[in-house]
Image (spheres, coloured by chain):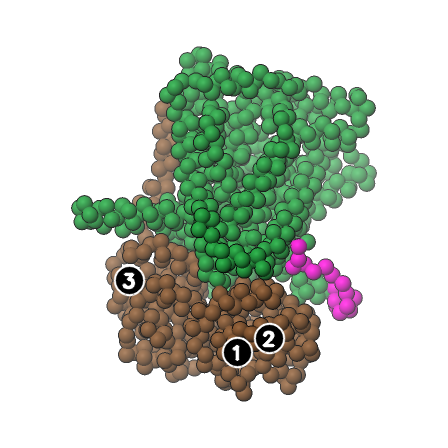
Chain colours: A green, B brown
Amino acid sequence: MARSHVRSIPHRLRLLRSGAPRDLWPVAAGAVALVVATPILVVVSSILTPSLEVWSHLWETQLAELAWNTIALITGVGLGVVVVGTGLAWLVTMYRFPGRGIFEWLLILPLAMPAYVIGFVFLALFDYAGPVQSWLRQVFGPGVWFPDFASYGGVVLVMTLVLYPYVYLLARAAFLEQSETTLEAARALGASRFRAFWKVMIPLARPSIVAGVTLALMEALSDFGTVAIYGFDTFTVAIYRIWFGLFDRGAATELASVLLFFTLTLYLLERALRGRARFYQTDGKVRPPTPKRLTGWKAWTASGAASLVVGVALGLPVAQLLYWTVTALGGPDYDDRYPAFMFNTLTLGTISAILAVGAAVVVAYGLRLSRNRIVTTFGRIANMGYALPGSVIAVGVLAPLAFVDHGLDAFLQATWGISSGLVLTGSMVGLLFAYLVRFLAVSCQTVEASLIKVTPSMDMAARSLGASKGEVLWRVHLPLIRGGLCTAAILVFVDVIKEMPATLLLRPFGYETLAVRIWQLTSESLWEAAALPALTIVAAGILPVLFLARSSARPRVGEWDDGTGGEGKHSRMP
Amino acid sequence: MRRPTSRIITVLALALTPILVQSIYTPEAREPGSVVVYTARIEKLIKPMFNAFTTKTGIKVTYFTAKAPELFERLRAEGPHTPADVLITVDAGNLWIADHAGYLQGFESPIIEKNIPAHLRAKDNAWVGLSVRARPIMYSTERVKPSALSTYEALGDSRWRGRLCLRTSRKVYTQSLVATMIKTLGEQQTEAVLRGWMKNQLRIFNSDTQILKAIAAGQCDVTIANTYYLARLQAKDPGFPVTVFWPNQNGRGVHVNISGAGVTKYATHRAEAIQLIEFLSSRAAQNLYADANYEYPANPAAEPDGLIAAWGSYKADSVDVAAAGALQAAAVKLMDRVGYK
């Protein structure tokens, strides 16, 4: 059995941490984390001057409902993504059935689908006035029953379908890392295949599943587009209502801090549940579990389940978008600037991916080398932007940028009588900074998960051979976690090209992207015209996701490669 | 294996890319002799007018589109250095707020005074209404007799139980409607009206278009919606089974809102900005402006589009719509209290 409780490793890590006195890595990590955390702290600091009047109004009217709805949302979506994501990951790693090879990567693709797009498409299809219900009424008469789609159930369905790939990706990688021998041992002790899965594989994969669920739930918390069109009032809806309706941005920001409180609760809850358990895989050559061939109805049920998810989450929306694109083709809403929009979208996605992964490496490596409380706290805060709606982050970003700009201008005016105007506000730098704040959690979680698998004895071996800490990172760690870096970059890329609210508020003058285009058209209910930019975003997202699928493909037997670049000879811990 | 230093150089180069992109990319806004517009009216509905202006005057127009509250955030952060010369928003409440937050400067123009009636302009000349958007009752031509309809208030009548659909209270159009009701009827009476609507098992939708389609499909029978949404649907399908009822004709009149423009406080091209707004108020531009979206022109000399003219003329509520901006928060809170989402 490849699992053992190795107490000495944390101890050795601690020895490693108490290294040279002039230790720049934790300082760098702290600095990066502090910069990223600043907008988040700006948002949180709004609590210091509470808008008591708005809060008491909320208390009297909606607060209980908002809290209840938000909890219900994350519970529902949490269960949904765990069941669908883990279930499908288990299915494709443990069994052979018709079409498994295709489903294995097809199941990742819904990641490229913006939630607001799939949400609207579903509503258009399944609402009372939509084609499905209209057809049912034609066939069965006007009294035919159909569930109300614009409801809690609809929201949970849509979000589950868009967000399960996070869990699927990470759970699948974790299952593939596990050893056939572990499973054989469990089976030899009399456990059924399912029981072995439940008692051995799930606990071992738990850190990965939890990381996936965390990302999914943070995204669900910050979502405005879907819950708004489904009329399901969560905290995020209330934020916009107070900001745009009461014109009280201060109170809206205070409400946004509540979202951070939710995230913090989730984080602490997970920590408490995990307790002191640590798992290491210390064995060398690991053979991933051999999939069992399913036959007869079981095989077809497995194929059916996988095709159902792919069909509903990907096939249906793409078909509807294609239909709309074709009907609106040649209309007045297309022009020759589309290639430019697409270029801008891809540029933003690429640059942000590089920045986010770079920052994540610095932060994660700094955290590995240091237990300094300040560094870890800032690191934690910097990872919370993913739970905040894009517009709130944008406001948090604008404040420090404007402060720097106006300060610089005033200084130059006073000293040399020249005006620098606005350097950062409304610039590309501001927008990229906002993406970094919003999506650092995505890259950081992924990079940390990879880095933590590299055993500290590697660090020590390299250091004793005279390598500096920087060299250890460049020449030992980065090559080892190459796969994890790739995964992180692609996840950020896909998230950025889908991102709309922060882009809308912070983009440089005259700089339009596909997501901004979608907003322009959908804000006037011109959905047919918005179908082409939506499809383009999906297509642009699918290409790198396909790459991701390839790079995390099933390793050959006898050679352990989990797609995060691990080469087997190192320990694994959550 | 490459040396660490070369890797560091690579990473530095990558990190510098955004700055490179930034420098290659010169913002159009800083071109001399052009007007910069921040607009909450989307490109599709405003670009034809800008093009006509450029053709006529040779002055280039560049624009930035976003939602009004977000444009305000940007104006606030940019302060005196804002590139914006003109602010265009939909909904008078937004104009009122822009004025009161100090984002606009007043300006006097005899041309505008001649073109646009006084009640569609700000008293302090901070902004000018450019189009009128009526929000009447709309009903199913298949299941509702117009004789059953009278006023917004009467939609609380029990005969509309389970048949009334309205737009979400998150939308500024709904907020302005309720705010003007508070202005004329007072808060108590407005609350009674809203409770009447709620008692009819009011169904809430996210967009006017969605509601109109729901009426056509038979899910709802009556609603309150902006006329241009219906016009767009009828332009595509002349047989679309929903039409307009002008409510409160014996009383205060139909609720109308406006889209409008103002000159920003720190406009660098003030003269050109005023020139642009004057042009937008002219008869020629007004025809373009209103027709682009089937709205009613603010300049009485311009004709509304034939499709909406067919619904007949109406008496509009003469309440100061902008003043309703002050009551918008009260309207939202009132809707919160009665449970209108």
Q: Earlier in the sequence, mark 3 or mark 2?
A: 2
- The three-letter amino acid code for the residue at tag 3 is Ala
Q: On the same chain: label 2 and label 1?
A: yes
Q: Secondary structure at mark 1?
A: helix
The furthest residue to the bottom:
B250
Choose the circle earlier in sequence order: 1 or 3: 1
Crowd around label 3: few <14 · some 14–19 · many ≥20 (10 Å): many
Measuring from the top left, give residue A227's x and y in whole percent.
59, 55
Magenta-drawn stretch contains B144: no
Q: Of circles 3 and 2, which is in front?
A: 2
Can marks 1 and 3 be said to lie on one chain?
Answer: yes
Mark with earlier residue (2, 1): 1
Residue at left 47%, top 69%?
B327
Left or right placement of residue A388 versus residue A152 in this view:
left
Residue type, label 2: Val
Q: Residue at x 61, y 64 (%)?
A: B339
For residue A429, above or below residue A248: above
The residue beneath circle 1 is: B185
Q: Chain of mark 1?
A: B
Q: In percent of the image, x 60 and y 72: which residue is there?
A: B194
Q: Hey, which quadrant is residue B11 in on the image?
A: top left
**Res. B298 in view:** yes
Residue in the foreground of this view, choosing between B315 and B232: B315
Q: Given contact means CB atoms under 8 Å apart, are the residues at marks 2 and 1 in contact? A: yes
Q: Which residue is mark 3?
A: B267
Residue bounds of the magenta highlight:
A136-152
Q: Percent from the top left, x then y, of residue B125?
A: 32, 73
User: Can you tell which mark lies on residue B193?
Assistant: 2
Quadrant of the rendered structure where residue B219 is? bottom right
Secondary element under disc 2, as helix, strand or loop, is helix
Taking the magenta stretch, the answer to whether it contains residue A144 is yes
Q: Position of residue A513 (x, y in %)?
A: 44, 52
